[in-house]
Image: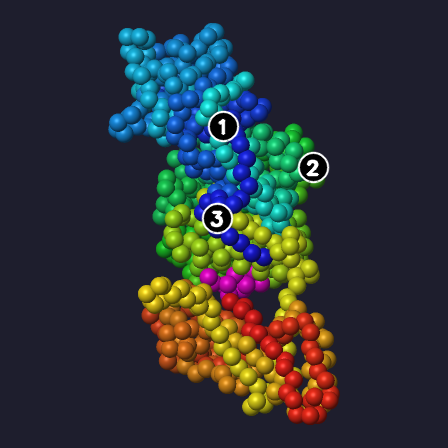
Amino acid sequence: MAHWLCSGRTVQVEGLVSRFDPRFWTVDFPRPMMASVVTTAPDALRVDAVFYKADDLAGVIWEAVDRFDHPLLKYETSRDFRDCRLRFRWRSSGVMALDAINGPTLTIEGRDAAGAARSWYVRLWNYAVGTPEDAVVALDFGAMVGGYELPEDADPVWAGDIDRMFVSVVPPDYTEVDVPLAVPREGWVEWTDLVCEGPRSVLAIGDAVVPEHGLRIAGGYDDSYNLTPARLLRNALHLGYRGSIAHYVGMSHYFRLERVGGGFYVSAAGGVLNAACAAWHRDFAARARALGFDVIWSLSYELFDAHCWSDWKQRAADGAPALTGWEPPSTLLSPAHGGAMAYLQAVARAFMGIAVGAGLAAKFQVGEPWWWVMPDGRPCLYDASAVAAFAPVQIATIRGTKTTAQIATLEAAGACLAASTAALVAAAKSEAPGCVSHLLAYLPTVLDARALEAKRANMPLGWASPAFDVLQLEDYDWVTAGDAAASAEGVAVALARLGYPADRQHYLSGFVLQPDQGPAQVAEWGLIEAAAAVARARGVAETFVWALPQVMRDGFVHFDPNGVETSGDEAVDAFDDVLFPLALGREAEVTPGFSTAVLTSAGGREVRNAAWAEARTAYDVGPGLRSEADIGVLLAFFRARMGAARGFRLRDPFDFDAVGEGLGVGDGVVRRFALVKSYGAAVRRITRPVSGSVSVAVGGVLTSAFAVEAGGWVVLDVAPAVGVAVAAGFAFDVPVRFAEDRLSVARATFLAGVATSVPLVEVREA
């Protein structure tokens, strides 16, 4: 496996796209309204909107700078629209008409000819021919005039330096006043026969296609609601992803709302999905099927807090609601509350209905169901429904040891959670018989080392195989922290407790939350790639990258070498963990080397550029051969290694051990440290320590509380405290291979005392 973080196209394939292509429009809006945009034809789009307040306004947006597509696939930046002419047929219903005072307006944001930032407001009705709800709109950006009444309010537009433009869509009774509508309003707008003409009507666009590979992709509606499904799936397809898409339906954009008092709360009246969400997902499902993707529909117990009924929320013993760290926060639904669970079941049926309607194979995931734990350790087991269901005793913190009564409470909470997930799966299957069920568990929370009994509540035995068809695991906090040891231990505990074989497991690797973190971001993607490789090596059925919006944002590209999937039994390690069979004599040659480019100027000054941070050592073991028997052993070993094809260990007679090497300093979290050997300021990574030779000291005190992982990693049982030094001593071998695919040995020259040349070269493994 290999990956690349692409910051921009260089020599990659480009194509052409019409400016204002329907796939690349977006929508945005304030809460609580909802809107979506989908493409209905190559030259057409549709916007669906749900309005709850009199000042709700959705913008249908075109941006001069592509902020959303993967760098390989972006359209070119072009801020000059002066030679463009845009024409489309407008049809609408349930929104303010073209001729109204606050009717659809094109807002253009950019700079005037003098470079001063400003906006223009173009009333579409001034450029329309037809009726207020069915008209052809023609916009010439080179001769466009803003203002309401023309020519009285004329404000000429200079379209030579534009950042973005958007068309407003508002309810028929829009008033610009922040008050609820008497009843929610649904509306739609369609643009058809959309065409852009003129010298600047065509843009370059990335059209590279990454070879198909073995990783799958995950994503979520909350992160992509503003994009067209066609645009989103284009990125997934071009980046080499195939097979299943794990699609989280989200917690903040799918629901209908009803007004009660001064707030809006989720509602099943008229169906649980709002019209915008339903339209988006119908299009997403149809396009996914057409492109050969499967969709795993993921539904969690998480819900946007401001729209959640008070009695549905999980609560701590003091009544505080379970709130996540998102801003604004989400909450967690109580598995014990019948109304909350009935609502989730209705949501599951609605999405499964969309899957079945699109002809997709029905696949449903219960996503990260759990009893919430506050940051200070308080479990949220005490909402009124939970108290009535299993009478929980007081547990001040989930951490530490627990009494018999507290353990019984955790077991009862787990049984309640398992019953609720079983009912949710049953609801999905009632809409889609034969639906494949998935459970997604987030290991760092469920298997917190400080809370050993938490798994009784949050990984209940009621989930054990065959409760679900597939067990999906994710552990991104451990992954991005570099704690591979915790990942391996967590997987082992989950499998021992739930018993799903590898061919009924999936793994989700990711994710990088924040953009623009520099080297830290590069490192996190490397860790995500490595974790995915580990999962595939242990033979899981599917491995996903979480998630597509971050892949697009950061330019992540994954490759499988030669286009071959290297998971499970197909994995090929071109290294044999065996020692070169002959002891090296003192005549053997050892040659460390670097790669340095030296540029000498006409005046004799030099500029030197070191291409390698570490020396790469070459060896010639031929002079150490002592007998014809040695030659026989060498030839057999050479054949077994297939010449230069496979690596092996070599004990360097001049450099084979280290004492007191500093491996790092504790931060209270990381337990995994790489073995290294220092040569002054230079540091050499050691990947092949001699078995049984490693000793470790933490804070200057020798410890046996560690293990050595393949690849030269020390894993401590307990993370060292902040500032505590970790050191090690060890013997080590050098990974090498034969430098050539031919080995020439002549008996006559050997007996005559002429040394045979057997060159080896060091293999970089880290």
Residue that badge 2 annotates: 433
- Residue 382, image x and y in percent? 43, 47
Indicate the amino acid at tag 1.
Val
Q: CA distance from mark 2 to mark 1?
A: 47 Å
Q: Which residue is mark 3?
A: 6
Categorize mark 2 by other alpha carbons within 10 Å: few (<14), some (14-19), many (20+): few
Residue 677 position in % (x across, y down): 44, 77
- Percent position of residue 660, x then y: 41, 81
Residue designated by label 1: 202
User: For the magenta stretch, what is the residue range?
Assistant: 482-492
Q: Earlier in the sequence, mark 2 or mark 1?
A: 1
Asked which quadrant contains residue 603, the reply is bottom left
> Is any part of residue 633 visible from this angle?
no
The total of numbered circles placed on residues is 3
Q: With 258 as the anchor, is 650 left or right in this view?
A: right
Q: Is residue 3 above or below residue 623?
A: above
